[in-house]
Amino acid sequence: MGIFGHCAVGLAAKPATPKVPLGVLLSPERLAERLELNEAARVLELGPGPGYFSRAVARRIPRGYLMLADLQREMLQKASTKLARSGLGNVGFAQANGSALPVHSGELTLVPLPRQ
């Protein structure tokens, strides 16, 4: 998908419209299904942006944990606001990059990586 500043992220997270064909972005629910997570999975979402996929993933792991790590504090704030409205309590947030992750070896079940 690429790197978006927190002010331009809305352009990447807009739902499909008649002018933008379906399938340009995978729906959050379809992505969560494809991950084949068990209910107790521990998942790191690296670069979640405003949490476009996060809510669907967190709902698939009610006994698990989803850690969102992003370089931009503003993105984490947007994701936190979105997830707070959903009432999900199995989500944590960390300002970090891929070379200094806030987890220990063996702590995670899955780290989904975006395809370019």
Image (cartoon, grey):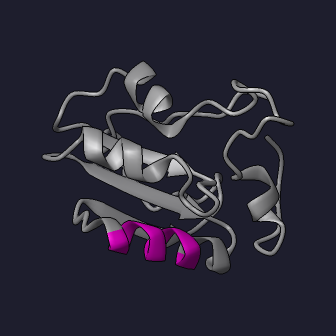
Rendered position, 89 above or below 107: below
Residue under the point 45% across and 51% down: 54
Q: Of helix, strand and loop, which mostly describes the magenta segment?
A: helix
Rendered position, 69 above or below 81: above
Residue 115 % position (x, y): 72, 27
Rendered position, 116 above or below 65: above
Towards the viewer: 94 or 57? 57
Residue under the point 50% across and 39% down: 28
Residue 12 % position (x, y): 77, 51
Q: In which quarter of the image is the N terminus?
A: top right
Residue that sits furthest to the left in the current view:
63
Based on the displayed image, in which of its 4 quarters is residue 5 positioned? Answer: bottom right
Residue 114 % position (x, y): 66, 34
Residue under the point 26% across and 51% down: 65
Task: Say whether residue 48 is left or right of residue 81.
Answer: right
The range drawn in magenta is 77-85
Residue 30 % position (x, y): 47, 26
Task: Say whether residue 76 is left or right of residue 40.
Answer: right
Count of labels shown?
0
Based on the displayed image, in which of its 4 quarters is residue 77 positioned? Answer: bottom right
Q: Quadrant of the C terminus?
A: top right
